[in-house]
Amino acid sequence: MSERFTKGMARNIYYGGSVFFFLIFLALTFHTTKEMPKRDHRQNITESVARGKALWEDNNCVGCHSLIGEGAYFAPELVNVYNRRGGEEGFKAFFSGWMKAQPLNIPGRRQMPNFHLSDQEIDDLAEFLKWASEMDTNNWPPNIEG
């Protein structure tokens, strides 16, 4: 091996590395597009779930909360809130009461604003969170309280 690092060697490393990582990128993209339909159960998206997601986005819930690890960590992770707070039996009643009771005005605690959502909007948001809880998230979050 030569004692000097030549421009040709640098060029070959640059182009070779670029091609190598581009091929890895393509392989991971292909793998993701193949696996996502198995994990996200998109066939279960209803109009209520779609309206709930629109509310999630319009009210910038991701500005404070995270969903499947994406978003801010100011407030709790919500992908498993459906299961943590009652599941099929009690989640919608809990969620409706929680949303209507905001802000809680507990001293020293961060305050969630009251978005003044209608009962239908709260139900749509609950349906979105229920749908999110049913995705295969590889056991995320790592602890039950998010």
Image (tube, helix red, strand yellow):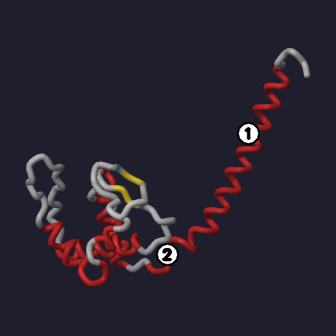
Q: How crowded is the residue under tag 1: few (<14 C-alpha within 10 Å), some, or many (20+)?
A: few
Q: Secondary structure at mark 1?
A: helix
Q: What label does residue 27 carry, if any?
A: none
Looking at the image, which is closer to me, 120 or 144? 144
Q: Amino acid at mark 1?
A: Ser
Q: Is residue 109 above or below residue 80?
A: above
- State left or right for residue 1 relative to residue 113: right
Question: Which residue is outermost to the right?
Answer: 1
User: For mark 1, what is the residue?
Assistant: 18
Q: Amino acid at mark 2?
A: Arg
Cα–Cα span, label 1 and label 2: 35 Å
Tell me which residue sits at (79%, 31%) in the image.
13
Tell me which residue sits at (29%, 52%) in the image.
64
Q: Are marks 1 and 2 in contact (CB under 8 Å)?
A: no
Looking at the image, which is closer to me, 71 or 88? 88
- State left or right for residue 29 relative to residue 111: right
User: For mark 2, what is the residue?
Assistant: 42
Tell me which residue sits at (19%, 78%) in the image.
93
Q: Secondary structure at mark 2?
A: helix
Q: Name the image quarter holding residue 83.
A: bottom left
